Amino acid sequence: MTNWKVILNIAKTHLLTKMKSTVTAALGVTFGIGAYITLVSFMTGLNGMLDDLVLNQTPHVHIYNEIEPSKTQPIGLYSEFKDALNVVHSVKPKQSQKKVHNAVPILDYLKRDASVKGATPQLRTQIFYISGSIQLGGNLTGIDILEEARLSNIQDNIVDGTPQALKNNDNGILLGAGLAKKMSLAVGDRVQISTVGGAIFPLKIVGIYQSGIADIDNVQSYANLTTVQRILGEPENYITDINVKLYDINDAVSMANQIEQQFDVKAIDINQANAQFETGSNIRNLITYAVSITLLIVAGFGIYNILNMLIYEKMKDIAILKATGFSGRDVQYIFMSQALIIGIIGGILGLLIGFGLSVIISRTPFETAALPTITTYPVNFKIGYYIIGITFALISTFIAGYMPSNKAKKIDPVRIIRGT
């Protein structure tokens, strides 16, 4: 029967008598785990911020009426050409309205669906912004601002003004920050907009919108849905887009397919809409984890080398232990215990150092005009990273200690004592 008290005392004695080697091995684990925690927390936090900039502005399912060429051309209506290969050049889009057909019933249906967190109508149109002699092209989107604020991060992007201010003003507009800067406008000023048809309407700026993406902020602005419908001279059921937010983003693909088949509209899920961005995000995460795991593996090799040298230095001790009745397994347990003690101490210190550095980074000022709502560097304090760190520390030290200890287990004490 293994006497663990004696084994642990011997392991402790070995570690204390070779304090320099012990500290070196523990520091290898400490800095490996600390660097892993710091790097993975910062990089995933940064990736999360970049993902939010794009994905939070993208609905889980986007419903609209896509203008496209008719799938059935006139030549296909003639029976004599039915079995022939018909090639039609320069096909033009068919006459179609931009609005979503039966938009109101679709909204009612979606809001009754238990998997849908919310569905918001939108009316998008191209306009010209006019301020004095300045005239800029852009987009105006009519929205239900309070519902958008509930379902997306639009409220975080309003750097001046409030969603409620837009809701309370039928002639109000949230102007893009790039547009406001170009036209020297601020909250409380008025801007005239001109439709494609030439009609001009004055609107009061009740807020400034800044997404952090310059291409959007230089053209985009928002107004109440009813305001844009009135500007375009359209009825209350005229809606060009419906944005759907789900409780589970994984349901987006099946929901989009179901809506397309059921209502004969175009429905794009979030994965399809952001395929290229998602690929870039996955690659960044892959690089982060690859570098982080490499740090842990390097720390594991350091422990292996130190324990291997420790066994060579303790050859006579091992021979004496075996000569006094300790079995090969007991000797293996002694050196395995040393490795795990180093792993536990080094791992805990590494977690503390990693957490401390992460806190310092999270409180470091991060100021940029493109992202006014973000004041410090983003850091992800996910508990899972700390669990992975300490688990890997124990596993790496176990593996690093097993091979040298297995060698110590097989040492012949007689040969050591004879000096052969």
Image (tube, grey):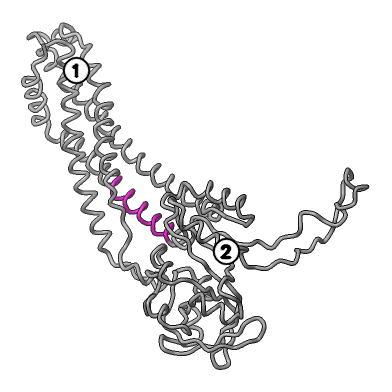
- Is the magenta region chiefly helix, strand or loop? helix
Query: Magenta segment: does it hold 47?
Result: yes
Give whichever of discs 1 and 2 has the lower sequence position. Answer: 2
Residue 414 position in % (x across, y down): 15, 6
The alpha-carbon separation of the residues under discs 1 and 2 comes to: 73 Å
Front one among 61 and 272: 61
* Mark 1 secondary-structure assignment: helix
* Mark 2 secondary-structure assignment: helix
The picture quadrant where one finds residue 349 is top left
Bin the neighbour count of mark 2 within 10 Å (Cα to Cα): few under 14, some 14-19, many 20 and up. Answer: many
> Looking at the image, which residue is at 22% across and 45% down?
351
Residue span colored magenta: 35-52
Bin the neighbour count of mark 1 within 10 Å (Cα to Cα): few under 14, some 14-19, many 20 and up. Answer: many
Camera-nearest label, 1 or 2: 2
Residue 83 position in % (x across, y down): 88, 43
Q: What amino acid does circle 2 point to?
A: Ala
Q: What amino acid does circle 1 point to?
A: Gln
User: Mark number for residue 144?
Assistant: none
Front one among 14 and 186: 186
Front one among 392 and 72: 72
Instruction: Specify whether 311 is left or right of 181.
Output: left
Instruction: Specify whether 221 is left or right of 377.
Output: right
Q: Quadrant of the N terminus?
A: top left
> Looking at the image, which residue is at 9% across and 8% down?
325
Residue 50 position in % (x across, y down): 43, 59
Badge 1 is on which residue?
Answer: 332
Badge 2 is on which residue?
Answer: 103
Query: Magenta segment: does it hold 389?
Result: no
Residue 9 position in % (x across, y down): 6, 24
